Image (cartoon, helix red, strand yellow):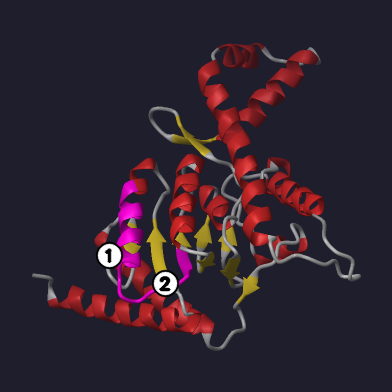
Amino acid sequence: MKPIFDLTLHNILNERLAKLEAHFNADVIFYYGPIADALEKPFRDFIEDLKNDTVQHDTLCIILNTPGGSAETVEKLVKITRHHYQEVCFIVPDAAYSAGTIFCMSGDKIFMDYSSALGPIDPQVFNGKNWVPALGYLDKVEEMINKSAAGQLTQAELIMLREQDLAMLRRHEQARDLTIALLKEWLVKYKLKNWNTHKDGTPVTPQQKEDRAKEIAKDLGDNKLWHSHGRSIGVAALTHILKLKIEDYSTDAVLKPLIREYNDLICQYILRNGSEAFLHSRKFI
């Protein structure tokens, strides 16, 4: 039997989630934690259970809070969500970094406020001990190769370069290439699907959508632009530098408190319980 305190919190969270579902006229779920392989089957079962409910929606809103993880896992999660829903939106009250940003780019809409953040799309690869940023690894190796070509490589750097695991290096390259390919596909198919005319009224061609998606993917993966794997990219940078359309709810007197009251409470609950990962829907907590 659940302790009365937890039961009360669960009821409050379910009530606040119900308000968000009514506002969006959609199924709303919450995910907190890294995006790792172990998430795939629980997420599939979680979504299937929700779709088996008597309440039926064609739209899914995902409230996402994650430090990132595997691009391959994100691809599988997108296949799951798109199998069941015609429209998928992401709400980022706090931060969705790395693979979390990749996940958001599969959405039809992204909701953020002035304090929310996405991050550079630097996919992480498991090296047997830790998750390491692929692009940072590749950038460093490229830097040493360029220094070697210019005759400027130090003896210490030469030793480090010789000790590189070529198989691991290839895994990093594959993670980078997969990330770019996924973003180009998803941005054209979902995020840019309603971009049909330019500001001057001329029609947007399919090639222009592909070029725009390629440019966004390139900029999000440019370490020279963001300088850090953990860099926060806010609404201003996303809209002005990347020219992405973001649904900014910073001044929305209705939606902002609905999201904050739910998100802040559930994050406190998660931290109190020391959970590494957490899922919530109207049918599961």
Q: Quadrant of the C terminus?
A: bottom left
Crowding near pointer 1: few (<14 within 10 Å), some, many (20+)?
few
The answer to whether 136 is drawn above or below residue 16 in the figure is above
Residue at 38% in and 30% down? 129
Query: Residue 205: in sight, yes or no?
Result: yes
Compared across the picture, whether 87 is left or right of 211 comes to left
The answer to whether 161 is drawn above or below residue 258 in the figure is above
Quadrant position of residue 46: bottom left
Distance from label 2 to label 1 (Cα)?
26 Å
Determine whether label 2 and label 1 are within 8 Å by CB: no
What is the residue that sits farthest to the left in this orientation? 1
List the residue tagged with mark 2. Answer: 27
Residue 117 is inside the magenta segment: no
Identify the element where label 1 is drawn.
Answer: helix
Instruction: Give the numbered dot on residue 272.
Output: 1
Residue 55 is inside the magenta segment: yes
Crowding near pointer 2: few (<14 within 10 Å), some, many (20+)?
many
Residue at 62% in and 52% down? 186
Residue bounds of the magenta highlight: 41-63
Of the pair 26 and 244, the residue shown nearer to us: 26
Picture coordinates of residue 227, whole percent (x, y): 67, 44
